[in-house]
Image: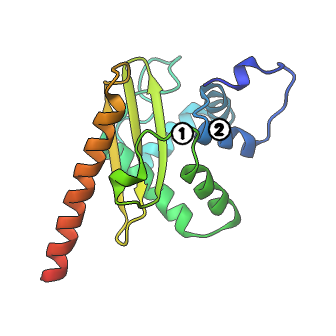
């Protein structure tokens, strides 16, 4: 959304405000400011320390890089660990992830469960990923190149519903054993 991009250049933001804009609004300018503060190399090394293979990969000027489901899952496991800590900031962070300005996957597709989510969008690429707060929480990661297609929302909801149904069947079978 680049909300910051259109603000007065002298406007100062706290780290918490930048995180909020990055998560709730998916503001790329806020995200780039955070990357510059933390350092691209530090983020890359942290991702690699988690076992990720594509953290901040791409051209030197690229602040976004590529992503795959394996890496995304590693990041979301860290998010869950942080949120489960129930610290002051983890509760704020959890609230941001529950209430983004864009919610293409609706809760009906997820059996009316809450969904801690982050979406991303650039060119043809779109992703929506997070943690579905089911009785047995699970990770939902959808990466697609249908960003500019009019039926993207329908595709996302059908995919989320299918994953939710598979999760339910797996849970029922594990309870039977």
- Is residue 50 visible in the rendered structure shown here? no
Residue placed furthest toward the right: 10
State the residue position of label 1.
43
- Is residue 133 visible in the rendered structure shown here? yes
Q: Position of residue 112 (x, y in %)?
A: 40, 60
- Placement of 69 over or under 169, stated as above or below: above
Q: Quadrant of the C terminus?
A: bottom left
Q: Residues within 10 Å of mark 2 (few under 14, many from 20)?
A: few
Q: CA distance from mark 2 to mark 1?
A: 7 Å
State the residue position of label 2.
38
What colour scheme governs how the chains and residues are painted in the rendered image of this protein? rainbow
Q: Nearer the viewer, residue 98 or 82?
A: 98
- Placement of 9 over or under 100, stated as above or below: above
- Placement of 11 over or under 6, stated as above or below: below
Residue placed furthest toward the front: 108
Q: Nearer the viewer, residue 161 or 75?
A: 161
Q: Is residue 106 left or right of residue 8?
A: left
What's the mark number on residue 14?
A: none
Q: Is residue 35 left or right of residue 171?
A: right
> Residue at left 34%, top 70%?
136
Q: Position of residue 28 (x, y in %)?
A: 59, 27
Q: Give the quadrant of residue 85.
A: bottom right
Q: Secondary structure under badge 1? A: helix
Callout 2 touching callout 1 (CB < 8 Å): yes
Q: Give the quadrant of residue 21.
A: top right
> Residue at left 39%, top 35%?
127
> Residue at left 84%, top 19%?
8
Q: Residues within 10 Å of mark 1 (few under 14, many from 20)?
A: some
Q: Is residue 43 left or right of residue 165?
A: right
> Residue at left 42%, top 63%?
133
Q: Secondary structure under badge 2? A: helix
């Amino acid at each position: 959304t680049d909300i910051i991009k259109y603000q007065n250049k002298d406007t100062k933001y706290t780290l918490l405000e930048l995180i909020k804009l990055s998560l709730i609004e998916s503001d790329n300018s806020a995200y780039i400011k955070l990357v510059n503060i933390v350092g691209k190399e530090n983020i890359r090394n942290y991702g690699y320390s988690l076992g990720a293979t594509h953290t901040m990969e791409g051209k030197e000027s690229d602040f976004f890089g590529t992503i795959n489901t394996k890496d995304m899952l590693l990041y979301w496991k860290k998010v869950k660990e942080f949120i489960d800590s129930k610290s002051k900031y983890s509760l704020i962070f959890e609230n941001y992830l529950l209430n983004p300005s864009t919610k293409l996957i609706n809760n009906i597709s997820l059996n009316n469960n809450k969904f801690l989510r982050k979406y991303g969008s650039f060119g043809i690429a779109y992703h929506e990923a997070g943690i579905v707060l089911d009785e047995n929480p699970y990770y939902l990661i959808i990466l697609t190149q249908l960003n500019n297609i009019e039926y993207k929302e329908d595709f996302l909801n059908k995919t989320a519903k299918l994953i939710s149904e598979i999760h339910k069947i797996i849970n029922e079978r594990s309870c039977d054993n």
